[in-house]
Amino acid sequence: MKLLFTSLGSHGHTYPLLPLAVAARKAGHEVIFATGEALLPGLRKAGLDTAPVTIDISSGFAAVVGDGPMPPPEDELPGIVAKVFGDALPRLAVEKLKPVLEAEQPDLVVYESGNPGGGFAAKLAGIPAVAHGFGRVSVGDLTDSISKPLVAYAAELGIELASPLMIGDPYIDICPESVQAPDFMAGNERIPLRPVGWNEPGELPGIVDEDEPLVYLTLGTAFGNVDVLKGAIEGLAKLPVNVLVAAGPSVDVDALGGVPPNVHLAAWVPQADLLPHVALVVHHGGSGTTLGTFGAGRPQLVIPQGADQFTNAEAVLAAGVGTRLLPDEFTAEAVYTQAKALLADETIHAAAKRLAEEVASMPSPEDVAAQLPAYAR
């Protein structure tokens, strides 16, 4: 069987699909992964065949903003985001995937849920498809605003959506049922899949092997902010712990300046390998980090910066596995106070352990790969 996986061209939208893609390849299926060129070297290292398609988030913004300022004015941003994800990116996906689907003729398309254009392209080509989530399904004003242009574009293609953001295809869900959005759970064919962290191979820094508890700090690959990282470092460094900071590709490590001796700075760490070694994760609330920490059974302090991170922070709170600091609550002292409490809170540690057990009980990528032929043509 030939499978075509496709995602938006960013780490947070691509990496959640890799465990299933690799499991399908190991099961003997031909697998092609179509996404932005910057992600392709990592996919090839994972043993996958690739197809470059320009459905990068930056291309979507360029299509909407044109020569306008980037980042856009704050009061215009919600409307622009709605157009980017509800119209510009789906159009790019349909345009760029059409020749790939014609050439490859896959038996099944697996499209990342943030890339509904992949589902549209499959439907227009008459190829069965399944959606693949990258985290908890977001609900609220932003989702509602994205759905309006998406519904309009779907109608333009002659496609009727089953719900505002769902085409109606089966949905591979990597979010544990206990923290998934209840409205989504009620109305979709859900294929549970254990969230398995993915990173390129790399060495863990030596600080991991030291005796003191280790706190991991990251703002992910797309939402790095020097001032937020500096404030969090200032707060965490006052604790009797070691602090490992992953600055990510959007922040220059040198911009963080001098740090106390219990703080270690890195541009990148193999996060999936790291999480089992830490006592606390302080992060932005990106889906990959949130779900990875669920699986590792560690408490979380979420400092959301944008996108779906606020609803992920709400899910962490609701599950009783951590706390959050909203932008107007964020100070170095607040980070210190919250982190200190989380490290000592046995109730939160017990809840994190229970959630990790739920994650471990979900079907593995190999289990779900064995189910895929039932959805193919």
Image: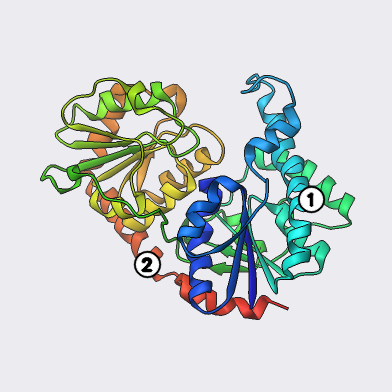
**Nearest-to-viewer mark from 2 and 1:** 1
Q: Does 138 sit above or below residue 132?
A: above
Q: Residues within 10 Å of mark 1 (few under 14, many from 20)?
A: some
Q: Is residue 337 left or right of residue 60?
A: left
Q: Along the line of sight, which residue is nearer the eye, 110 or 176?
A: 110
Q: Quadrant of residue 370?
A: bottom right
Report which residue position mark 2 lands on: 360
Report which residue position mark 1 lands on: 95
Q: Secondary structure at mark 2?
A: helix
Which amino acid type is shown beneath numbered disc 1? Answer: Glu
Q: CB under 8 Å between callouts 2 and 1?
A: no
Q: Give the x, y percent position of residue 182.
A: 57, 56
Q: Residues within 10 Å of mark 2 (few under 14, many from 20)?
A: some
Q: Residue furthest left?
A: 211
Q: Quadrant of residue 284?
A: top left
The residue located at (23%, 44%) in the rendering is 205
Whole-angstrom CA distance, mark 2 to mark 1, is: 39 Å
Q: Along the line of sight, which residue is nearer the eye, 142 or 124?
A: 124
Which amino acid type is shown beneath numbered disc 2? Answer: Ala
Q: Give the x, y percent position of residue 144.
A: 70, 41
User: What sort of colour scheme is used for the picture?
Assistant: rainbow
Q: Quadrant of residue 86?
A: top right
Q: Is residue 365 left or right of residue 355?
A: right
Can residue 274 be seen? yes
The residue located at (70%, 37%) in the rendering is 60
